[in-house]
Amino acid sequence: MMKKIVYIIGVTLVFSSCSFLDTEVYGNLDEKNLYHDENSCMAGLAGIYDRLGAEGVYGLNIWGELDAGTDLTVYRADYNKSKALPSLNNYNNTDPYLQLTWQHLYEGINRANDYIASITGRTDSDCGGARKKTMFLAEAKALRALFYMNLVAYWGEVPLRLEVVRDLAQQQLKKSSQPEIYRQIIKDLEEAEPGCLPADELNAPGRIAKTTVQALLARAYMWQAGYPVEADTWEDALIWARKVRDSGLHTLYKTTEDGVNGYRALFINMCSNKYDLTYRESMFEVEFYGNGLDKTNESGKVGLYMGISQQTTTDPDVPRAYAWYHGTKLFFKMFEDADARKWWNFADYKYVTTDGKVKKVMLSDSDKASYVDGDPGKWRAEYDPVRPWSLNSSSINFPVMRYSDVLLMIAECANEVAGSPTKEAVDAINEVRKRAGISEIGLTDCTQSSFRDSIKVERTRELCFEVPRHMELRRWGKQYFFDRINLLKDQSMDSQNKKIGYDLTTVKALPAINLAEKHIYYPIPQAELNTNPTCGQNVNW
């Protein structure tokens, strides 16, 4: 497995023939020959990372079906209105998407548990030295924390498994409360933080660096401060986010020499398999490789299921994409006309097929003026360098953490800690707004409440389709969660005399039409309950 990586240093492109995906993942090794040298230890670590790229996790479901059906993203295919899908809120706990994501997240946890126990029992020399052993354990614990962060984001209370499960007897475990899960997440991350390598030493975002752990700690503390836990952890989140900023290792990607806005350039590079080692805005990415047409099959679906629709199969010179999901009309209205992110996060072109040949057609000014909603353009398959293009597979990476998120966490947390916007908070949000080309916020322009609203909008515009939207809505309040999703069916008129929501006959209104109290979290999959009846089902399911 080899992913060609282009490192960007200033304007110099340096090609590298290796990445973390080059690491061989060992299988079928027994206790006698497992983890007794640095290579096998690295291979075991790669096996944990591998689950991040599974279809149930960042390969598709986490940013696709499980996170659609909100004010941000909706399933678009009207001909499937009667289909049971998580994104339509008409599913039950036998749903295959839920089952696959649950399975893959716990597979990652089980691998991490097994690896942590094994490496802990190895000598320093078995692992290539004391520093390497510490690093291996640190990254494994950070990965376990990340798997649990995804579980708590979508299910809330889940079984907290910290030992490898080898038989059904070990499978029996009750759900843990969210405070208990957050305590373990934070414990793992705080133990991992000193052992992970600095970002400038790793020199690629495919592995978890020290500052990535700090950013995940800020995220975990911030999530815990929101609904339903509502812990007093805003200051803890702020402390960890500041550590990332103060490291000096990460900045926002700047406008390129040929005038491409930094936000656009960042995602063009990501889609092109180019890693930036100058700004390091993308702090941690789940890596994908190839087009799914060979036996390695380390590809994902980024830019295809969430991308620009093009389903003609007769033209090999144009990428094919299902594009099952649309950015909503509610989200589109959040953008100012001058915002450089507007016509990147929404596709500014479409594909037109004539006699089997596909042509890329840019939207005209009148097209844009009448635009309502449509294909997300954040990840664009046209930049994927792997050929031939595949309808179901891409090599585009998915970003788990970016520095812009850290800045917006600083802004949000500083506002909460001080009880009003501070210079630090305003400077942080303005750094993101300046790159987007929109006006800056003045220190005296906002109250604590109005600044919260500005942060909600800014996080949505900047981090759309990246950070779990269900989690964002929920942590800002249970009522906020339901109010935002219910806008999809709102039949009242806005200030421009246009309907706020969608016609009730369309598939895009269904998430709101079907929305019930129980949908605050997903149900525990039936497959888990079959083998672990001790677990118990989530509330209202």
Image (cartoon, rainbow, N blue to C red):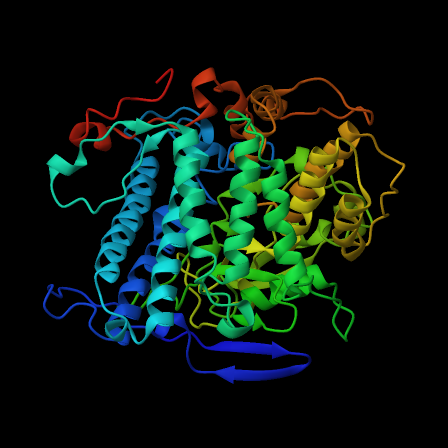
Residue 238 in picture, x, y percent from top left: 64, 44
**Residue 370, quarter of picture:** top right
Residue 114 in picture, x, y percent from top left: 22, 53
Q: Can the viewer see residue 178 in this picture?
A: yes
Quarter of the figure that contains the N terminus: bottom left
Residue 481 in picture, x, y percent from top left: 57, 25
Quarter of the figure that contains the C terminus: top left
Given residues 334 and 322, the one toward you in this image is 334
With 341 as the anchor, is 231 left or right in this view?
A: left
Number of numbered discs on residues: 0
Given residues 392 and 143, the one toward you in this image is 143
Q: Can the viewer see residue 310 in this picture?
A: no
Residue 61 in picture, x, y percent from top left: 41, 44
- Residue in the image at 36% along x and 49% along y: 144
For residue 22, above or below residue 535: below
**Residue 379, quarter of picture:** bottom right
- Residue in the image at 35% along x and 50% along y: 55
Given residues 34 and 239, the one toward you in this image is 239
For residue 497, above or below residue 149: above
Given residues 454 and 466, the one toward you in this image is 454
For residue 86, above or below residue 384: above
For residue 131, above or below residue 83: below
